[in-house]
Image (tube, rainbow, N blue to C red):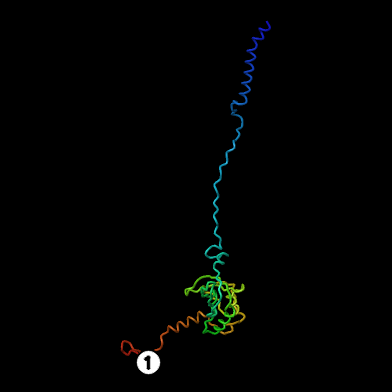
Amino acid sequence: MRSRSRKSLLPVVALALLAGYFARGRSTTDVAPNPSAPSVARPVPRQPEPPVRVVKQEKASDSPRGVSAHQREQRQVHLRVVGVHDGDTITGLDGSKTQFKIRLDAIDAPELGQPFGQASKKALSEKVFGKDVAVIAKTTDRYGRTVGHVLIDGRDVNLEMLEEGMAWHYKKYDHNTRLGSARAARKGLWQDRAPMPPWDWRRNRKEQRGRPAGRQGKTIWLGAVVGSMP
């Protein structure tokens, strides 16, 4: 009787064990989502950022109005001075024996026919003739001359000519207020009571050359006498 009852209980126990097994598996894997439970944000994969393009900003020194250190170096011309024409113009040769005619920038020396014209030329010759100089080129004038500042041993020759009263400040082409003048100290050309600027002197000479000469003697035109007789 007992063996029979045990045999009848075996299927019931086996079914209970299977039901418990499946119940545990469902609770861990097939649990339905609870609508009232707070949602958890899933991390979004980070997309690679596009490469950043660096654009070089233009500096003030790179603009046409400015001169950078690199441009300054490129504009330097190293010469041996072989000629001095007057107080503001020289001739020099570079390392390849190429000739350059240099017009000193920002100054205008007296013409050779003016008072202190020869003194100005002599002063410039004593400073640069036969010596090695560096020229900071600024531009080229209508005569093909290189316009710039002449440096020797770190000294600005253009400025020295002004400070010694051997040249005028050429304000028509230069507005640098730092360029000094010997006028207050009455040096050089400023010793004259009424010094004439070289640009006025040149204009007067040009007007005198262009002025027609007075009628003197015979003026012949196509074989006819149209002038006055002496």
- The residue lying toward the viewer, choosing from 196 and 22, is 22
| Picture residue at 47% right of the left edge, 83% below the top | 205
Q: Residue furthest right?
A: 2
Residue with the most extreme front position = 96
- Say what amino acid the circle numbered 1 marks: Gly
Q: Quadrant of residue 49?
A: top right
Q: Is residue 40 above or below residue 72?
A: above
Point out residue 103 in the picture as x, y percentages from the top left corner.
Answer: 52, 75
Q: Quadrant of the N terminus?
A: top right
Give the secondary structure at mark 1.
loop
Residue drawn at x 63%, y 15% as measured from the top left? 14
Q: Is residue 65 left or right of residue 19?
A: left
Residue farthest along the bottom direction in this orientation: 230
Q: Is residue 23 left or right of residue 204?
A: right
Q: Position of residue 189 (x, y in %)?
A: 57, 82
Q: Give the number of marks.
A: 1
User: Residue 97's spot in the image, x, y percent?
Assistant: 52, 73
Q: Which residue is mark 1?
A: 217
Hey, which residue is sitting farthest left in the picture?
Answer: 223
Q: Position of residue 191 (x, y in %)?
A: 59, 84
Pointer 1: residues within 10 angstroms few (<14), some, or many (20+)?
A: few
What is the quadrant of the C terminus in the image? bottom left
